[in-house]
Image (cartoon, rainbow, N blue to C red):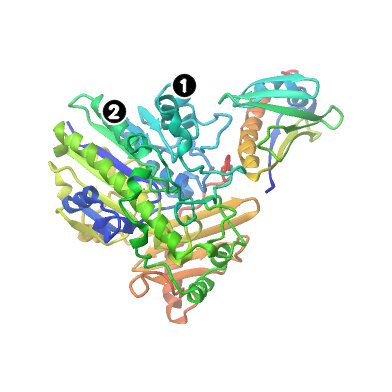
Amino acid sequence: MYGTVRHEIRIQRPAADVWALAGDAERLCDWFPGIVSSAVDGTLRTIVTASGIPMPEEILACDDTQRRFQYRLTMPVFKHHRGTIDVIDLHDDTTLVVYSTEADPRAMALVIGGGTAGALRELKRQMELTTEGAL
Amino acid sequence: MGRKILFITTDQQRYDTLGCNGGTIARTPVVDALAAQGVRYERLHPQSVVCMPSRSTMITGQHVSTHGVWMNGVPLPEDAPSVAEVLHDAGYRTAIIGKPHFEPFLDPFARFAENTFAGNGTFGPHRGFEHFESATHGAAGPLHYARWLLATHPEAVGMFYPVLDGSLEVNAMGGGDTGAPQAWVNNIPKEWYHTDWVADRTISWLDSLAADDDWFCWMSFPDPHHPWDPPASEVARIDWREVPLPAGYIENQAERERVLDNKPKHWRAWYDGRVVSNYEAPLSWVPASLTADQIRETTALNAVECELIDEAIGRVLQHLRAKGCDDDLDIVFTTDHGELGGDFGLLFKGPYHVDGLMRLPLIWRPAPSSRAGAESGTTVTRPVGHLDLAPTFCTIAGVEIPHWMEGKPLPIDDTDADARGFERVLTEWDSELFGVGVHLRTITRDGFVCTTYLPGTAHDGTEGELYDLNDDPLQRVNRWDDPALAALRSDLIADLWDHQPPMQLPLRGVEAPV
C-alpha cells in the first residue's frame, strides 16, 4: 500500500544559497541527521545510515533551473520510492524547501519522512547560521 | 535513608487478567499478594490507549494534550519533564529496564537516543535515568535485549513471531493451533525470553547499588502485548480449549453486529475490514473473521505471559527481601493500556474507549515502614489516572511535586479520594494516518463513560458514546442519544471540556509508524 509524506520549511536565505547545499547530492550527509556518508557515482548514490544500513539510491533528477532534486531508494523492501526536494524562491530573499516522500510500503513513507523532517530543520539551522555566501 | 520505589509496568494488560481483579485464567499470586498488602484500584484509566502517549504520561505526569505525544510515532522531546529526573536530582539512583518507548522504534537513521545506547555499548543516561537498558516484544531492532540475544543465543533470534510483515505493517499472520493472528509457537527457552531477561537485568542493577542508596527502578515488561508467543515450554500451563470466552464477547453474530452498529461507525467499519484507522492493528486482518477458538487461544497465551511476568516479579521481590530492602520499598504495579481481548469480536487496540482498553490494573503496596496511611487490602473505587503516578512517586520520595505535573498523589482509600477530588479521569485519542483521522475525548465520572467525537474521516463531530457502568458494565448499550440521559450527557461533556487541557500547537510531527 502506498503512502506519501510531505514536510516543508521556510529558510531566511536566498534560494540559490539553499540550493547550493540541498542540490549537492554528495553533501546530503552534511545536513540529514542520521546519514553518516553519501557517495555518488554517476546516477548512483549510496548513503549509509547511523545504524549502519547502506541504502543505494538512483538519482532521477538534479535540475538547477527548477531547483529540484529527485531520487529513489532501490532497496528490495521498497516496491516504490520517490524522494523529492524542491527549493522554491519566495522572492524576498527567503526560500521554501519542500521534501516529499512517496513509498510503497506506506510505513516506509513515515519512517523516511520522519528523517526528512529532521533534515529540513538541520538545513534551516545551518543555512541561517551564516548569512554570507553559500555554505 | 528514604523509601525505595519499584515501579512495575506491563504492556497491554487487561484489568481482568489478575486474580485479585477477578481473573480466573492466569495465576498471579505475587501481584495478588501485593494487592492484599496494599491498595488495589478498580478504576485506573490511561490518558491514552496506545503505548507512546501513555508512557509519556507516566513519565511526565501530564495529559497527552500537554506533553504533546498525541499518537504513536510522535517522539517525546528529550528535554520533556521527567519524574525520573526529579528523583535523580533529589539524590535517587534511577533506572529503567525493559520497554521504554518514549521514542519511535522504527528508526533506520538512529535519530532517537533510545535506539542508540545498545549499539554504542552504553546504558544512558537518558530522561533522568542513569541506567537505561531496553527491550521490546521480540529480538529485532537496536535495543539491549535484541543485542544480548544476538550475541549470546543467536539461534533464538528467529524463534519469535515476526511482529511486522514484509510491508512493515503489523503482521496478520496466524499461528498456534487456531490460526489466530499473532499467535505463535516460540521455541525459545524460558530463561532467554524477554520477561526473564527484564527481571535478571533488574536484579543485576539493584545489586550494583549501595545498601543505603535510595532508588527508583522502572521495571517495564514488554508482555503481554501481542504477539502472543510465550516460550513453547510454558504454553501447556493453560489448555486453551478449557478457557472460557470473555464476558465481553457476544457469541451470537447478529447480536454482536447489532451492538457494534449502535456505536459510532468506525467500530463496525473496522470489524468488517473496511477501515483500519490506526497502525496498531494488523492492516490485512478482518476482525469479523475472528473465531471463538481463536479468542480462547489468544486469551490462553496472553494468560501464560501474565503468569511468567508474575513469577519474574516474584523473583525480583524475593531477591530484594533477601537483601533486606523490603521494609522501605514501595511497589507500584500497572500497565500502559488494555487489550480488546475478544470483546465485541475484536482484538488488539485502537480508538475504542471501553473497558477492555481503558480499565487497567493498578496496585500500590506502600513501604511497610511507612504504610503511607493505607490499610492492607484496601480497594479504591474512585477514578484515577496514569498522570497520578508521577506525583505519587514524588510524595513517596518526599520531594515537592513540580508545577508541571497535572495529576495528584494516588488516594489511599475512597475517603481520601473524595476528600481530594478524585471525581473524574480523562482519556484522549488522536490519530492521523494516511488520510484517516480519528479524534476522541472521554470522561469517566459518576459511573458513566462518556466519549465525544471530534470531526474526522469517519465522524462529523456529532457522534458519541455514553455507557452506564453500573447497569451496563460490558458497555453494550450506547445511550448517547437517550433523551433520559440528555442532561447528564451535557453535564459530562461540559465537565470534560472544563478539565481537558488544550492540545499543544502546532502538533508535533509523526516521525515513524510506531
The residue that disc 2 covers is B205
Amino acid found under the numbered disc labelled 1: Asn
Is residue B11 visible in the rendered image? The answer is yes
- Mark 2 vs 1, N-terminal side: 1
Q: Is residue B240 above or below residue A45?
A: below
Q: Mark 2 — on which chain does it sit?
A: B
Q: For mark 1, what is the residue? A: B120
The residue drawn where x is 62% and y is 44% is B167
User: Whole-percent x and y of residue B40?
Assistant: 24, 55
Which residue is at the far bottom? B484
- Position of B221 relative to B272 (above/below): above
- Looking at the picture, how far across and down is residue B68, in whole percent? 50, 45
Question: How many numbered circles does the render carry?
Answer: 2
- Residue B395: in sight, yes or no? no
> Which disc, if any, is residue B462?
none
- Check the picture and name the quadrant holding the N terminus of chain B: top left
Tag 1: Cα neighbours inside 10 Å, few (<14), some, or many (≥20)?
few
Left or right: where B445 falls relative to B253 = left
Secondary-structure class at tag 1: helix
Amino acid found under the numbered disc labelled 2: Trp
> Please, what secondary structure does the residue beneath circle 2 have?
helix
Direction from residue B356 to residue A122 in the image, left or right = right
Residue in front for this viewpoint, B275 or B412? B275
Chain under label 1?
B
Q: Which of A4/B67 is in front?
A: A4
**Apparent side of residue A82 relative to residue B378 in the rendered image (left or right):** right
